[in-house]
């Protein structure tokens, strides 16, 4: 549902059904990564830890969760934006646009970032 809504708002969306699929897709260039904490095979904190270990630029991460975070999760997610479910999809769109606008990638993705920000 979220992916469909974001596509209608002009975003290009790639879906991964698990943390392992998300990591495999991470070799592509993304402006923002969204994840849940509850996923098959690998929880969101582990996914984020492994994603941050990849030799990629520091991509912004939005964590969407219905969980109440414990102190260790709060520390692990300090570099992420956390949205508690249920959340307002318009708030997610505004956050995504602000993160894409602030994109610090090199010139190869600049046109894409500007297009997303203007969407």
Image (tube, rainbow, N blue to C red):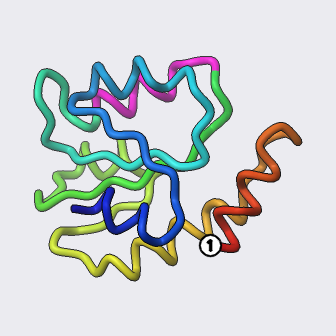
The image shows residue 93, relative to residue 114, as above or below, that is below
Q: In the rendered view of the protein, which quadrant contains the C terminus?
A: bottom right
Residue at the farthest front position? 8
Q: Is residue 28 left or right of residue 107?
A: left
Span colored in magenta: 46-55
- Of 33 and 111, the residue lying toward us: 111
- Name the side, left or right, on which 58 lies relative to 18: right
Residue at left offset 55%, top offset 20%: 27
> Is residue 65 positioned above or below 97 on the image?
above
Could you say where residue 18 lies in the image, as x and y percent from the top left? 22, 29
In the rendered structure, does residue 49 fall within the stretch colored magenta?
yes
So how many labels did they put on this image? 1
Q: Please identify the quadrant where the N terminus is shown.
A: bottom left
Q: Which residue is mark 1?
A: 119
Q: Residue at x 31, y 22 (%)?
A: 21
| Image height of 2 relative to 51, above or below | below
Disc 1 crowd, CA 10 A, few/some/many (<14, 14-19, 20+):
few
Report the predominant secondary structure element of the magenta stretch.
helix
Residue at image location 16% in from the left, 74% down from the top: 86
Residue 105 rendering spot, x and y as whole percentages: 77, 43
Q: Residue furthest right?
A: 107
Q: Nearer the viewer, residue 100 or 55?
A: 100
Viewer-side residue, 26 vs 52: 26
Which secondary structure lies at badge 1? loop
- Horizontal relation, residue 27 to residue 56: left or right: left
Point out residue 50 in the picture as x, y percentages from the top left corner: 40, 22
Residue 33 percent across, percent down from the top left: 46, 45
Q: Is residue 102 magenta?
A: no
Please report the residue visible at 69 percent of the width from the left and 73 percent of the height from the top.
118
């Amino acid at each position: 549902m979220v992916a469909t809504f974001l596509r209608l708002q002009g975003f290009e969306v790639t879906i991964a059904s698990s943390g392992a699929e998300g990591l495999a897709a991470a070799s592509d260039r993304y402006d923002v990564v969204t994840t849940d904490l509850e996923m098959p095979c690998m929880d969101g904190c582990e996914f984020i830890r492994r994603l941050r270990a990849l030799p990629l630029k520091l991509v912004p991460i939005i964590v969407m969760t219905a969980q109440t975070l414990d102190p260790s999760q709060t520390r692990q997610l300090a570099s992420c934006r956390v949205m508690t479910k249920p959340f307002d999809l318009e708030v997610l769109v505004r956050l995504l646009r602000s993160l894409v606008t602030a994109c610090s990638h090199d010139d190869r993705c600049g046109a894409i970032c500007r297009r997303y920000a203007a969407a």
